[in-house]
Image (cartoon, grey):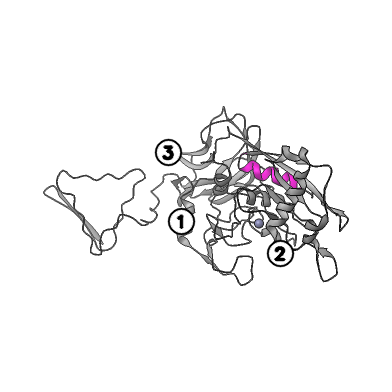
Amino acid sequence: MGRLRIVKGKIFEVVENDLHYYSEASITESASDVYAEQGGDGISHSGDPGTPPPSPTLSKCAVFFRPTKEWKGEFGFDWIRVGDSKMETDVAYNGIIGHYGDVYATKKEAKFTADPKKYNTILKDYSTFSVYKGTYYVPNMTLKVGEKATLDTIIHVGEKADKLHYAYNTDIFELTIIKKFTVAKGINYDESSLIIKCKKTFSSSETIRVIATKNKITEKVGEIKVLPNDKIKDINILMIPVKVVKMNATGAVKGNEKTIAVNAFNQAYFKANIFEKSTPIIADGFLFNLFFTTKDEKGNIVTDTSDWRSIHATLDKIFFEDKKNEAYREYYRVFMLPTSLGLNGIAEDVGNVKTVVAFANRNDSSTAHEILHAMGLYHTFDNSSPYTFKIYQTDNIMDYTHQTKNPKTKAWKSRFSTNKFQWKKINKDIK
Ligand SMILES: [Zn+2]
């Protein structure tokens, strides 16, 4: 219980438990005389003041946007996942963000601990506003000029609005409404209901909003933030087949790996130019054969994993012995090996390197994964990542979910998405 008393111009506010003040804008306090604070256990001007309760909203509805189940990362879409989409892998972030102990996440004995504080930190990376039933975390989208994004809409309805409409810059975007909002009381899921096309480049963030009208009062009930797309960077990638003389075999491009890489870089506003060397480099001789001296239990020659740094240096050394290849010094170089081991591929390091190795049994998403390591991204389940996610729970390219199967279809799951915190890391123009 609390009470507010006004006595001769003085205001006394007394509560028995905690008292919180939250403002949607700033809080200003000033006194002409003394400004005094007293705390029984001291005064803290830091720490986490907690999340403000949602302010009352008029419209009892909210509209959320999700990629469709067909999305393979053709455009960037990053949101606080709550597990409400139709996508194959979509686990709520609350509970899968935390940290691992000393044992690395890929090991069976690894121990993951969810961390609510870390979850609260990631929430702060998104714009918010108050909406029916709570706080709305605005998704971040990247969409290049000329590209289209098809989205699902989820409409939560407590009380029907008089009208729902989209508000956006019509010079920049063209919206095609495939299906009008379903507004039955409860939760309505409209699949592939909206297509957003970007017609023009723009240099500061744009929003696409859903506005509800109720009793002639308008209120925002849904939003997507589209990041500026006027600075697309080129990224040059050279796929280099490696012939291992000792095995009489040559590495080659695999399945959809080029498309998955183009999509992955698209999400962070890069244009990936992927080239392929038509003639293989020949890996032979004493130095290189050092890597192919190990045999598996069936007697097949496999790669010796004892010194990874040296394999990158060795491949680069062979490659640059041909002076014509100097032109590729600034390219990301993907050395495609014909060998297979437990590994898909390996980057020379995390960040500031250009060379990656791709093994024969790699997944279609491995090449993009390795180049992203070379550009500075850690595994999403690594404690060095800005946010550490529980392994196998996301479709992020930097997760290992492709090593798990869909329990219904028994097919291997795919990974293709990236988050804004990763876009920012590899592209300094993304804020
Ligand atoms: Zn990796």
Mark 1, other Cα within 10 Å: few <14 / some 14–19 / many ≥20: some
Circle nearer the viewer, 3 or 2: 2
Tell me where residue 135 appears, x and y as whole percent: 45, 50
Query: How many C-alpha atoms fall within 10 Å of the one at disc 2: few (<14), some, or many (≥20)?
Result: few
Mark 3 surroundings: few (<14), some (14-19) or many (≥20) residues within 10 A: few
Task: State the residue lying farthest toward the front.
Answer: 286
Residue pointed to by mark 2 = 306
Label ID, residue 215: 3
Magenta region: which residues? 256-269
**Residue position for label 1:** 120
> Is 126 left or right of 294, judged from the image as shown?
left
Question: Mark 1 or mark 2, which has the lower sequence index?
Answer: 1
Q: Which of marks 3 and 1 is nearer the N terminus?
A: 1
The type of residue carrying mark 1 is Asn
Judged left or right of residue 17, residue 134 is right
Q: Can you say whether 58 is above or below 47 in the image?
A: above
